[in-house]
Amino acid sequence: MQLFRNGYDIVTVGINLTEIKTTEDLKKINMSKPTVFTYGSFKKLDAQQIDFLYEAHCFGARLIVGLINDNWASFTERLAILLANKYVDYVVELNSDDSLPDVLKALSVDILVFGSDQVCPAGLEAHVGEVKKIELLKDVNSLVQKLRHINANYGLPKKGK
């Protein structure tokens, strides 16, 4: 297990993230609240998954993605792609021997997020504050419309104002 940071984050300044190897080590980091967590293999990062990460990020102060290291696809490549996404604050490498309930407790996860096509494994909800589902986009045009709406309402100030 290892924790990776996306860019400069004040929470982990001065912490050597390469020393994070166990769930006990994860407990040393005081994450901003609410902390949102999702996990998967992220073998293909398409528009639907980008929107999913955006929606998940909107639920809290931090989005931590558990990236399953299943040796099926390049972990390093998938890690780099996730860390390049501005909605992802941290990525935790999940190996087959990592206990997901222990990781959730160590990170003090408030919100566990799944896509509408996923089912929360039995017992996981006991280790988080709440479980939320995100309706997945049906097509790329929906994402483009959503991004235009976000930009129009929360983007740069209009000229003359």
Image (cartoon, helix red, strand yellow):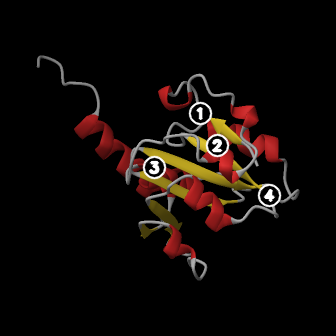
Q: Foreground: 51 or 109?
A: 109
Q: Quadrant of residue 16?
A: top right
Q: Residue furthest bottom?
A: 122
Marks 2 and 4, how far apart at CA: 17 Å
Q: Is residue 89 above or below residue 66?
A: above
Query: Badge 1 is on which residue?
Result: 6
Q: In whole angstroms, how far apart are the C-alphas of marks 1 and 4?
A: 20 Å
Residue 44 appearing in the image: no
Residue at image position (27%, 25%) is: 156
Asked if disc 1 and disc 2 are in contact, CB closer than 8 Å, the reply is yes
Classify 31 as above or below 126: above
Which is more N-terminal, label 4 or label 1?
Answer: 1
Depth check: give the residue in front, 28 or 149: 28
Residue underneath mark 4: 95
Residue flagged by tag 2: what amino acid is it? Answer: Leu
Q: Residues within 10 Å of mark 1 (few under 14, many from 20)?
A: some
The residue that mark 2 highlights is 82
Q: Secondary structure at mark 2?
A: helix
Marks 3 and 4 sit apart, C-alpha to C-alpha, by 25 Å
- Distance from disc 3 to disc 1, alpha carbons, whole Å, reads 15 Å
